[in-house]
Image (tube, rainbow, N blue to C red):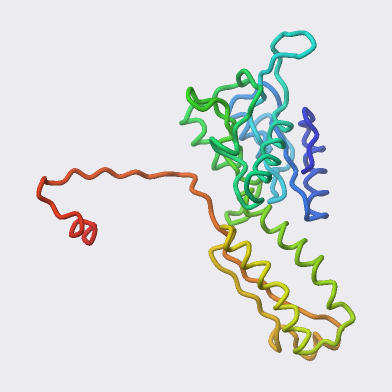
Amino acid sequence: MLMAPGVTTANVIHAGITYAENRKDLMLVAEAPIHLEPLETVNFRKGQGMYSHAAFNSSYAALYYPWLEISDPVTGKKKLIPPSGAVGGCYARSDQKTYVWYAPAGIDRGRIFNALSLGYKASRGERDVIYPEGVNVIASFPDTGINIWGQKTLQSQPSALDRVNVRRLMMYIEEAIAESSRFVVFEPNNPQTWRALIRLINPFLQDIKDKGGFYDFAVQCDEETNTPAVIDRNELVARNFVKPTKTAEFIELNFVLTATGADFKEIFKTA
Protein backbone atom coordinates (compact mmCIF):
# COMPACT_ATOMS: atom_id res chain seq x y z
CA MET A 1 0.00 0.00 0.00
CA LEU A 2 1.06 3.57 -0.68
CA MET A 3 -0.39 6.51 1.23
CA ALA A 4 0.41 10.08 2.23
CA PRO A 5 -2.00 10.79 5.10
CA GLY A 6 -3.40 14.30 5.04
CA VAL A 7 -1.80 15.21 1.71
CA THR A 8 -4.72 15.71 -0.65
CA THR A 9 -3.25 17.86 -3.40
CA ALA A 10 -4.07 16.60 -6.88
CA ASN A 11 -0.44 16.60 -7.99
CA VAL A 12 0.55 14.24 -5.19
CA ILE A 13 -2.36 11.87 -5.84
CA HIS A 14 -1.63 11.81 -9.57
CA ALA A 15 2.04 11.12 -8.83
CA GLY A 16 1.02 8.29 -6.50
CA ILE A 17 -1.22 6.82 -9.18
CA THR A 18 1.59 6.96 -11.74
CA TYR A 19 4.00 5.30 -9.32
CA ALA A 20 1.50 2.52 -8.48
CA GLU A 21 0.69 1.90 -12.14
CA ASN A 22 4.37 1.66 -13.05
CA ARG A 23 5.08 -0.83 -10.26
CA LYS A 24 1.82 -2.78 -10.65
CA ASP A 25 2.17 -4.37 -7.22
CA LEU A 26 0.65 -1.83 -4.84
CA MET A 27 -2.47 0.24 -4.21
CA LEU A 28 -2.59 3.95 -3.55
CA VAL A 29 -4.93 4.64 -0.62
CA ALA A 30 -5.98 8.27 -1.03
CA GLU A 31 -8.43 10.49 0.80
CA ALA A 32 -10.53 13.54 0.06
CA PRO A 33 -9.61 16.90 1.62
CA ILE A 34 -10.92 17.72 5.08
CA HIS A 35 -14.33 19.37 5.60
CA LEU A 36 -15.83 18.45 2.22
CA GLU A 37 -19.48 17.57 1.75
CA PRO A 38 -20.39 14.49 -0.33
CA LEU A 39 -20.97 16.20 -3.68
CA GLU A 40 -17.83 18.28 -3.22
CA THR A 41 -15.93 15.03 -2.81
CA VAL A 42 -17.28 13.83 -6.17
CA ASN A 43 -16.09 17.09 -7.73
CA PHE A 44 -12.65 16.51 -6.18
CA ARG A 45 -12.51 12.99 -7.63
CA LYS A 46 -13.56 14.22 -11.09
CA GLY A 47 -11.71 17.54 -11.13
CA GLN A 48 -14.94 19.49 -11.49
CA GLY A 49 -16.61 22.44 -9.76
CA MET A 50 -14.00 24.37 -7.80
CA TYR A 51 -11.31 21.88 -8.89
CA SER A 52 -9.48 22.08 -12.21
CA HIS A 53 -7.18 19.05 -12.06
CA ALA A 54 -7.53 15.98 -14.27
CA ALA A 55 -9.91 13.34 -12.96
CA PHE A 56 -8.36 10.54 -10.93
CA ASN A 57 -8.64 7.39 -13.02
CA SER A 58 -6.82 4.20 -12.08
CA SER A 59 -7.56 0.71 -10.82
CA TYR A 60 -4.41 0.97 -8.69
CA ALA A 61 -5.91 3.63 -6.42
CA ALA A 62 -8.93 4.08 -4.15
CA LEU A 63 -10.38 7.21 -2.54
CA TYR A 64 -11.87 7.30 0.98
CA TYR A 65 -14.11 9.85 2.70
CA PRO A 66 -14.60 11.48 5.24
CA TRP A 67 -11.93 12.21 7.86
CA LEU A 68 -12.13 10.56 11.29
CA GLU A 69 -12.68 12.19 14.66
CA ILE A 70 -10.46 10.87 17.45
CA SER A 71 -9.34 11.87 20.93
CA ASP A 72 -5.85 13.34 20.65
CA PRO A 73 -3.66 11.12 22.88
CA VAL A 74 -1.48 14.14 23.75
CA THR A 75 -4.06 16.84 24.48
CA GLY A 76 -7.14 14.72 25.16
CA LYS A 77 -9.12 16.98 22.84
CA LYS A 78 -11.12 15.86 19.82
CA LYS A 79 -9.48 16.30 16.43
CA LEU A 80 -9.96 15.19 12.83
CA ILE A 81 -7.37 12.95 11.22
CA PRO A 82 -7.07 11.60 7.66
CA PRO A 83 -8.65 8.18 7.22
CA SER A 84 -5.95 6.50 5.11
CA GLY A 85 -4.03 5.15 8.10
CA ALA A 86 -7.12 3.44 9.50
CA VAL A 87 -8.05 2.18 6.03
CA GLY A 88 -4.59 0.68 5.64
CA GLY A 89 -5.10 -1.06 8.97
CA CYS A 90 -8.35 -2.56 7.68
CA TYR A 91 -6.56 -3.81 4.57
CA ALA A 92 -3.93 -5.50 6.74
CA ARG A 93 -6.47 -6.98 9.16
CA SER A 94 -8.58 -8.27 6.27
CA ASP A 95 -5.52 -9.99 4.77
CA GLN A 96 -4.66 -11.51 8.14
CA LYS A 97 -8.17 -12.85 8.71
CA THR A 98 -8.91 -13.95 5.14
CA TYR A 99 -7.13 -13.38 1.79
CA VAL A 100 -6.31 -10.44 -0.48
CA TRP A 101 -9.33 -11.20 -2.68
CA TYR A 102 -11.73 -10.43 0.18
CA ALA A 103 -13.03 -6.87 0.23
CA PRO A 104 -11.48 -4.71 3.00
CA ALA A 105 -14.91 -3.29 3.77
CA GLY A 106 -18.11 -4.04 5.64
CA ILE A 107 -19.11 -4.70 9.22
CA ASP A 108 -16.39 -7.27 9.89
CA ARG A 109 -13.25 -6.52 7.86
CA GLY A 110 -14.07 -2.83 7.39
CA ARG A 111 -14.55 -1.99 11.06
CA ILE A 112 -12.55 1.05 12.19
CA PHE A 113 -11.59 1.08 15.84
CA ASN A 114 -10.53 3.94 18.13
CA ALA A 115 -12.49 6.58 16.19
CA LEU A 116 -15.10 8.58 18.07
CA SER A 117 -17.05 9.90 15.12
CA LEU A 118 -16.74 11.16 11.55
CA GLY A 119 -16.04 14.55 10.04
CA TYR A 120 -19.24 14.09 8.04
CA LYS A 121 -21.92 11.47 8.59
CA ALA A 122 -23.20 10.64 5.13
CA SER A 123 -26.77 9.44 4.88
CA ARG A 124 -27.71 6.32 2.97
CA GLY A 125 -28.99 8.46 0.12
CA GLU A 126 -25.72 10.39 -0.04
CA ARG A 127 -23.72 7.15 0.01
CA ASP A 128 -25.81 5.79 -2.84
CA VAL A 129 -25.06 8.91 -4.89
CA ILE A 130 -21.31 9.20 -4.41
CA TYR A 131 -20.31 5.52 -4.29
CA PRO A 132 -20.96 4.97 -8.03
CA GLU A 133 -18.63 7.94 -8.60
CA GLY A 134 -15.71 6.10 -7.01
CA VAL A 135 -15.83 7.55 -3.50
CA ASN A 136 -15.62 4.95 -0.73
CA VAL A 137 -17.63 6.25 2.20
CA ILE A 138 -16.76 5.52 5.79
CA ALA A 139 -20.12 5.24 7.51
CA SER A 140 -21.36 5.20 11.08
CA PHE A 141 -24.06 2.77 12.23
CA PRO A 142 -25.74 2.64 15.66
CA ASP A 143 -25.15 -1.09 16.13
CA THR A 144 -21.81 -1.76 14.41
CA GLY A 145 -19.91 1.49 14.83
CA ILE A 146 -17.73 3.02 12.13
CA ASN A 147 -17.18 0.93 9.00
CA ILE A 148 -15.67 1.28 5.55
CA TRP A 149 -18.74 1.04 3.33
CA GLY A 150 -17.27 0.77 -0.14
CA GLN A 151 -14.42 -0.77 -2.10
CA LYS A 152 -14.33 0.86 -5.51
CA THR A 153 -11.09 1.74 -7.22
CA LEU A 154 -10.71 5.02 -9.09
CA GLN A 155 -11.05 3.32 -12.47
CA SER A 156 -13.66 5.19 -14.49
CA GLN A 157 -14.35 2.44 -17.05
CA PRO A 158 -16.69 -0.19 -15.57
CA SER A 159 -14.97 -3.57 -15.32
CA ALA A 160 -14.03 -6.15 -12.71
CA LEU A 161 -10.99 -4.00 -11.90
CA ASP A 162 -13.14 -1.18 -10.56
CA ARG A 163 -13.24 -3.11 -7.25
CA VAL A 164 -10.37 -3.17 -4.74
CA ASN A 165 -10.62 -6.90 -4.04
CA VAL A 166 -10.28 -7.83 -7.72
CA ARG A 167 -7.38 -5.45 -8.34
CA ARG A 168 -5.52 -6.80 -5.30
CA LEU A 169 -6.26 -10.38 -6.39
CA MET A 170 -4.79 -9.71 -9.83
CA MET A 171 -1.71 -8.04 -8.36
CA TYR A 172 -1.21 -11.04 -6.12
CA ILE A 173 -1.47 -13.72 -8.80
CA GLU A 174 0.49 -11.75 -11.40
CA GLU A 175 3.42 -11.24 -9.05
CA ALA A 176 3.32 -14.78 -7.66
CA ILE A 177 3.19 -16.46 -11.07
CA ALA A 178 5.85 -14.18 -12.54
CA GLU A 179 8.17 -14.94 -9.62
CA SER A 180 7.64 -18.71 -9.69
CA SER A 181 7.89 -18.93 -13.49
CA ARG A 182 11.54 -17.92 -13.52
CA PHE A 183 12.52 -21.60 -13.53
CA VAL A 184 11.62 -21.86 -17.23
CA VAL A 185 13.92 -19.01 -18.24
CA PHE A 186 16.65 -20.39 -20.56
CA GLU A 187 14.90 -23.76 -20.79
CA PRO A 188 14.11 -25.17 -24.25
CA ASN A 189 11.04 -23.49 -25.70
CA ASN A 190 9.17 -26.69 -26.48
CA PRO A 191 6.00 -28.58 -25.45
CA GLN A 192 7.74 -30.20 -22.48
CA THR A 193 8.53 -26.81 -20.99
CA TRP A 194 5.04 -25.51 -21.81
CA ARG A 195 3.46 -28.42 -19.93
CA ALA A 196 5.82 -27.95 -17.00
CA LEU A 197 4.74 -24.31 -16.72
CA ILE A 198 1.06 -25.32 -16.79
CA ARG A 199 1.73 -27.90 -14.05
CA LEU A 200 3.20 -25.09 -11.96
CA ILE A 201 0.41 -22.57 -12.49
CA ASN A 202 -2.65 -24.84 -12.30
CA PRO A 203 -2.33 -25.93 -8.63
CA PHE A 204 -1.70 -22.33 -7.54
CA LEU A 205 -4.83 -21.03 -9.28
CA GLN A 206 -6.85 -24.05 -8.13
CA ASP A 207 -5.94 -23.25 -4.53
CA ILE A 208 -7.22 -19.70 -4.97
CA LYS A 209 -10.43 -21.04 -6.53
CA ASP A 210 -10.91 -23.45 -3.62
CA LYS A 211 -10.51 -20.52 -1.20
CA GLY A 212 -13.12 -18.42 -2.95
CA GLY A 213 -11.02 -16.15 -5.16
CA PHE A 214 -12.22 -17.41 -8.55
CA TYR A 215 -15.39 -18.77 -10.04
CA ASP A 216 -13.15 -20.55 -12.53
CA PHE A 217 -9.86 -20.31 -14.44
CA ALA A 218 -7.96 -21.79 -17.40
CA VAL A 219 -4.31 -21.79 -18.47
CA GLN A 220 -3.20 -21.97 -22.11
CA CYS A 221 0.42 -22.53 -23.11
CA ASP A 222 0.69 -24.38 -26.41
CA GLU A 223 1.33 -24.01 -30.14
CA GLU A 224 -1.35 -21.33 -30.39
CA THR A 225 0.32 -19.03 -27.86
CA ASN A 226 3.84 -19.97 -28.88
CA THR A 227 3.92 -19.62 -32.65
CA PRO A 228 7.17 -19.96 -34.63
CA ALA A 229 7.43 -16.16 -34.69
CA VAL A 230 7.13 -16.01 -30.90
CA ILE A 231 9.71 -18.76 -30.46
CA ASP A 232 12.11 -17.02 -32.88
CA ARG A 233 11.93 -13.94 -30.62
CA ASN A 234 13.07 -16.19 -27.74
CA GLU A 235 9.77 -15.66 -25.96
CA LEU A 236 7.39 -18.05 -24.20
CA VAL A 237 3.76 -16.98 -23.85
CA ALA A 238 1.13 -18.39 -21.49
CA ARG A 239 -2.43 -17.09 -21.18
CA ASN A 240 -4.10 -17.20 -17.79
CA PHE A 241 -7.88 -16.76 -17.94
CA VAL A 242 -9.61 -16.05 -14.62
CA LYS A 243 -13.17 -15.32 -13.51
CA PRO A 244 -12.68 -13.38 -10.26
CA THR A 245 -15.25 -13.66 -7.51
CA LYS A 246 -17.41 -10.55 -7.16
CA THR A 247 -18.66 -9.13 -3.87
CA ALA A 248 -22.28 -8.75 -2.79
CA GLU A 249 -22.57 -4.99 -2.32
CA PHE A 250 -26.26 -4.45 -2.99
CA ILE A 251 -28.70 -6.82 -1.32
CA GLU A 252 -32.24 -7.15 -2.70
CA LEU A 253 -34.79 -8.84 -0.45
CA ASN A 254 -38.19 -9.60 -1.95
CA PHE A 255 -41.10 -10.57 0.28
CA VAL A 256 -44.09 -12.35 -1.25
CA LEU A 257 -47.33 -12.95 0.60
CA THR A 258 -48.88 -16.31 -0.26
CA ALA A 259 -52.08 -18.14 0.51
CA THR A 260 -52.06 -20.47 3.51
CA GLY A 261 -52.40 -23.56 1.34
CA ALA A 262 -49.88 -22.49 -1.27
CA ASP A 263 -47.24 -24.98 -2.45
CA PHE A 264 -43.87 -23.22 -2.22
CA LYS A 265 -42.25 -25.59 -4.74
CA GLU A 266 -44.82 -24.60 -7.36
CA ILE A 267 -44.35 -20.91 -6.52
CA PHE A 268 -40.56 -21.22 -6.95
CA LYS A 269 -41.05 -22.69 -10.41
CA THR A 270 -43.24 -19.82 -11.60
CA ALA A 271 -41.46 -16.95 -9.83
Residue placed most toward the observer, 205 or 151: 205
Farthest residue to the right: give it. 186
Q: Position of residue 143 (x, y in %)?
A: 48, 25
For the point 83% across and 49% down, the residue is: 19
Quadrant for the N terminus, please.
top right
For the point 50% across and 30% down, the residue is: 126
The quarter holding residue 226 reads bottom right
Position of 265 with respect to 222 (left or right) is left
For the point 76% across and 31% down, the residue is: 8
Q: Position of residue 140 (x, y in %)?
A: 54, 25
Q: Position of residue 159 (x, y in %)?
A: 58, 57
Count of numbered circles on the image: 0
The quarter holding residue 75 reads top right
Q: Position of residue 106 (x, y in %)?
A: 55, 38
Q: In this view, does 257 lie above or below 49?
A: below
The quarter holding residue 242 reads bottom right
Residue placed most toward the observer, 182 or 27: 182
Farthest residue to the left: give it. 261
Q: In this view, does 176 lie above or below 193?
A: above
Quadrant for the C terminus, please.
bottom left
For the point 79% across and 49% down, the residue is: 20
